[in-house]
Amino acid sequence: MLEKIKDEKTDKLAEALACLKTADEVYRFIGDICTISEITEMSKRLVAAEMLRDGYTYSEIAEKTHLSTATITRVNRALRYGNDGYTMVLDRISK
């Protein structure tokens, strides 16, 4: 999967995200680079990933996040077969 998105432009984005040091800096950057809808959608997906790890059902997740079951399925697929990004982030923020 990473090879499908990795190029010079996405390298620059990854470097930009990696240089951010605080939550405030992240808010400032994503507030400039993303729409409110994009930020909200990413936030919902992270919540869905956490709920999936905690054993919630798709219907419970859909009710709480207002995500479609198709999106929840994609999040679940990423959790199981993806690049371990959700797992890495959820492990780090839960400490």
Image (cartoon, helix red, strand yellow):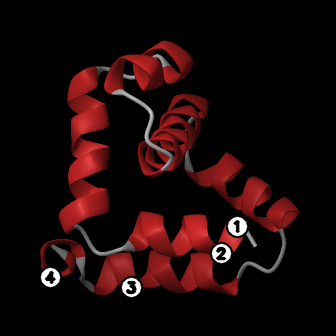
Tell me the kind of residue under disc 2. Answer: Arg
Cα separation, mark 1 vs mark 4, equals 26 Å
Q: Which residue is mark 1?
A: 93
Q: Residue at x 33, y 26 (%)?
A: 58
In what element is the residue under mark 4?
helix
Tell me the kind of residue under disc 3. Answer: Asp
Cα separation, mark 1 vs mark 3, equals 24 Å
Depth check, front residue: 30 or 1 = 1
| Residue 20: percent from left, percent from top | 73, 78
| Residue 12: percent from left, percent from top | 45, 83
In what element is the residue under mark 2?
helix
Q: Residues within 10 Å of mark 2 (few under 14, many from 20)?
A: few
Tell me the kind of residue under disc 4. Answer: Glu
Q: Earlier in the sequence, mark 3 or mark 2?
A: 3
Q: Nearer the viewer, mark 2 or mark 4?
A: 2
In this rendering, position of residue 69 left or right of residue 64: left
- Residue 3 numbered tag: 4
Tell me the kind of residue under disc 1. Answer: Ile
Q: Earlier in the sequence, mark 3 or mark 4?
A: 4
Asked whether disc 3 touches disc 2, contact meaning CB atoms under 8 Å apart, the reply is no
Q: Nearer the viewer, mark 3 or mark 2?
A: 2
Q: Which residue is mark 3?
A: 11
In this rendering, position of residue 53 left or right of residue 15: left
Q: Earlier in the sequence, mark 1 or mark 4?
A: 4
**Residue 4 image-quadrant placement:** bottom left
Asked whether disc 1 touches disc 2, contact meaning CB atoms under 8 Å apart, the reply is yes
Q: Residues within 10 Å of mark 3 (few under 14, many from 20)?
A: few
Depth check, front residue: 84 or 16 = 84
Q: Which residue is mark 2?
A: 92
